[in-house]
Image: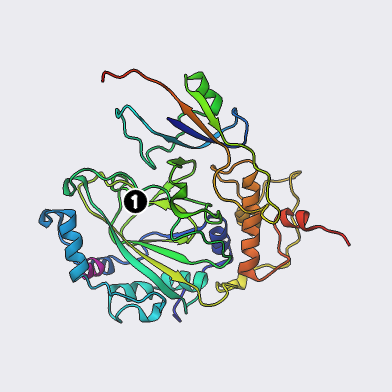
Amino acid sequence: MSNAELLSTLDMARFAGQGFLRLDAVVPEALNQQFLDDIGHVSENEIGSAIEHYGRIMSRSAIPVVGAGTPLTDAYPPDSALTRILELPKVAGAIESLVGGDCVLDHHFLHITFPPHLLEKPAPAQHNHQDSTVDPRQAFDVQIMYFPHAVTENMGGTRFIPGTHLRVVSEAAIARYQNVLGQQRIVCPAGTLLFVHHGIWHGGGANRSDRMRYMFKMRLAPQRPQQRLWDTSDLDTQTPQRPIFWLSESVREDDVATHLTRNLPWHEQDTGRLEHLNAIRFWRYLTGDEKFDADYWLTRVENEPQ
Amino acid sequence: MLVLYLQNSALDSRVIAWANYDGTGSSRPMTGDSDEPPYSTGVHALRDGWRLFQASTLQQHSHGDEFRTGYLKYEFFFEQLVHTDE
């Protein structure tokens, strides 16, 4: 991954605070078409039913069956669309920055959301959930969601709630939260990748268009501590604590502390502050700096004079 | 049924998440179907005829787990009885 364009410190701080990184149209159109050819996409006019199409794709697709825990670099054939996508400088850089170039593939899956005319009855949106199971680790997996074609609003692109990634919940136990302030939906040009922390709350939308929606998901797991894997040339470890509450000027947007302590629309008044503490702890893990703090949140509760 | 999640334990605090379930079958609410809450606070739902029948209790933080976040804490269940033709 020598051509990788690593993330910057502010990119990483934004990811630490909100749990996602979006790369719009990062995959060139020719590669998107190669991917669609590889999976066996055919026009909606040639499809009799959703079950028939899924069966055809599962049996004929060029997506390999890969053992869980396979090194990512060994997961796909050299000239496949997926290998070429993973080698794109921005994609390789994001992977290397978040989970390391020696990460392994947990699993992958091609999600197809069918339009109503290919279903016996229209499918509702998927409930909000957190993938896998309860996972209180500090280390994190990354899920890459690849959208090989343009996703319009009525196609029900993946819905997610920024900043929920550090909440420890049990998969679909959060299903009763139908709508959450600040939720976002993927509406994007072809070739967009969404990188999410494994803990992000999300769900697929209902497809109300007349076209199929594809989303290929890869879950990547790190094999080393995720410390300073990005381009740390702009990482400032000497900045003193900035003033809090009583300020003479507004806070800087391009600041690590700002990204880690941003109030999000869905934050509860009290646990929103705990989100700040948890994001700061997450940044300590990412930087290996156990004394790091932002706006005095951890220093205050760790102050035990001897 | 209407479920509101509020910003704190006060019923007049701001709605941050919500869910609807329609037992009459005349509408089919689903996940992600709205970005604007139906009411700005829990009290606004009361004023519109919704009856509060359950509110989450305040839980003491267990030792060593004070900073862990998980499910939304301030959950309020409302109901409204309506006449149907059936």
In this rendered view, identify the residue nearer to me: B10 or A157: B10
Residue A255 appears anywhere in the view: no
Residue A127 relative to residue A236: left or right? left
In this rendered view, identify the residue nearer to me: B21 or A200: B21
Residue A114 appears anywhere in the view: yes
Q: Residue at x 60, y 68 (%)?
A: A286
Quadrant of the image occupied by residue B59: top right
Whether residue A11 is in magenta: the answer is: no
In this rendered view, identify the residue nearer to me: A71 or A36: A71
Whether residue A38 is in magenta: the answer is: yes
**Where the C terminus of chain A falls, by quadrant?**
bottom right
B67 vs A141: above or below: above
Number of marks in the rendered image: 1
Residue A238 relative to residue A216: left or right? right
Q: Residue at x 45, y 34 (%)?
A: B36
Where does the magenta region start and end?
A: A34-39
- Mark 1, residue position: A157
A94 vs A184: above or below: below
Q: On what subunit does the disc labeled 1 rest?
A: A
Specify the amino acid type for callout 1: Gly
Q: Residue at x 45, y 45 (%)?
A: A183
Residue A58 relative to residue B43: left or right? left
Quadrant of the image occupied by residue A124: top left
The chief SS type of the magenta part is helix
Q: Position of residue A14 (x, y in %)?
A: 55, 58
B6 vs A130: above or below: above
Q: Position of residue A100 (x, y in %)?
A: 50, 75
